[in-house]
Image (spheres, grey):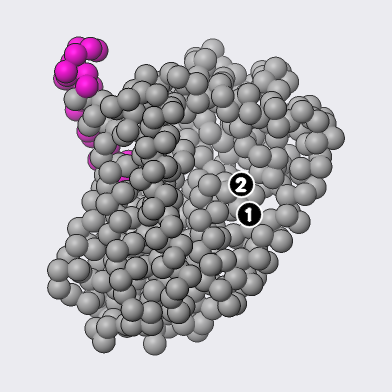
Amino acid sequence: MTKARIDGLYLMLLGSVVFVLLSVALQNTAGAPLEDFKAHYYPARTLIQHGDPYMESEVLRVYRAEGGEHASDTAKMRLVATRFEYPPSVFTFTVPFAMLPWGPAHMVWTAITIGGLIFASFTVWKFGAANSPIVSGALVGFLLANSEVLIITGNAAGIVISLCVLSVCWFLGERFTLAGILCLAVGLAVKPQIAGPVWLYFLLAGGVHRKRALQALLATVALSLPAVLWVWHLAPHWMQEMHSNMLAFSARGGLSDPGPASSGAHGLAMVISLQAAVSFFCDDPRVYDTASYLICAPLALAWVFATLRSRFSPERAWLGMAAMSALTMLPVYHRQYDSKLLLLTIPACAMLWAEGGLTGWLALGVTTAGLVLNGDIPWAILLAGIGKLHLPATGISSKIVTGVQVFPAPLILLAVGVFYLWIYARRSPGAVPSAVRKFPDAAGGAG
């Protein structure tokens, strides 16, 4: 191993240590720890007890009977824990956790999230290290060191992102193919809004990759069907109930409302979809949804066209993944912890950096900015500073504070997505500059 690879590995390991230590410490001191894991655990417990997991009153009964509710709980915490808004397919993954008591269940969930994200990050680093181990190690380490909110909240995005990243690495490296198919299938079952675009890339890429995408879809159906039938038997009106729960969260002022009046769209774990930025100018869902779709639709079509017209190569695939990982956050509801999918930009950044020139500097700049402006620690520092200013709740000062919170994340994601899409679309199919090394092959080494 060269000195550069050792240094890059040390940077990644440093980020891993910071991630583990801060995550465990903050989870134990947070006012509402594992809030999002409760949103999976108690509905699954309700299903096991032959109740309707989409009926708030039935989940609340289980939540209280099993000691989930505490005197310090807020109305927001109860709402998150008892109003289930995920499709029934997620129970395939969450019911095994719900069969355990709360203590072991949340410890296993946390361990899988931490271990999975570190393992996925290391796998990505190996691809980036083929071209620039230090740049790759620094970027991966920084992302890891700024992923504590995933552990504090216990959101399933941490596990799904790890599964998606591993499936991409294994498919492009031509190894552990069956494991990659299973990882992608679980991701599609749990959070299709994250795993779906990854699956779509392989479907459009054609050849053996389309075959793997179809195998992953078939595996998703096979894994999900028993849970869907189980839910349909116990809760025949689950679709209407799930829709009602989603409306409760997305109503004006609700937790998932991207507008300025939202009770949960700003601060740490903020909403990062483009709607949050557009709503600053017009807090009307018809306006900010339409504007977001009009901005994102041409970019999505350009990405699809570039994927269909190109001859597949791992180097080109990483460029497509980099563009997709940023653009997929913008048109539909996503929160800050979902942006850890930007792990998929790092091999492409390392490849462009190895080419040198202005393109390399731009790649490093926009990728770093994307990670910083979606990082947990920078936002914690910024929000703490804003909180000490004691600004009035109305007027120009309030508008400035709101703007500072809603603009950086979606706009930098748009910049990252457009940059990598530009490189992806203009690069000749199969062209790999001489300065760029091939990514690891099936044997795990670099060609």
Query: In the image, 53: left or right of 408?
Result: right
Tell me, yes or no, if residue 69 can be seen here: yes
Q: Position of residue 272 (x, y in %)?
A: 37, 39
Q: Is residue 231 above or below residue 398?
A: below
Mark 2 and mark 1 residues within 8 Å of each other at the beta carbon: yes
- How far is disc 2 from disc 1 in space, using C-alphas? 6 Å
Give 96 or 175, whichever is nearer the viewer.
Answer: 175
Residue at the disc numbered 1: 186
Give 393 or 447, whichever is nearer the viewer.
Answer: 393
Q: Residues within 10 Å of mark 1 (few under 14, many from 20)?
A: many
Q: Is residue 66 above or below residue 102?
A: above
| Image quadrant in which you'd find residue 359 | bottom left
Q: Residue at x 57, y 48 (%)?
A: 192
Give the SS element for disc 1: helix
Give 402 or 146, whichever is nearer the viewer.
Answer: 402
Query: Label 1 amino acid?
Result: Val
Query: Label 2 amino acid?
Result: Val
Q: Which residues are magenta?
A: 374-399
- The secondary structure that dominates the magenta segment is helix
| Image quadrant in which you'd find residue 271 | top left
| Magenta-span inclusion, residue 22 | no
Residue at the disc numbered 2: 190
Q: Residue at x 46, y 82 (%)?
A: 441
Q: Residue at x 49, y 53 (%)?
A: 161
Q: Position of residue 29 (x, y in %)?
A: 41, 29
Give 164 or 395, whichever is nearer the viewer.
Answer: 395
Q: Residue at x 24, y 63 (%)?
A: 363
Q: Position of residue 223 (x, y in %)?
A: 73, 54
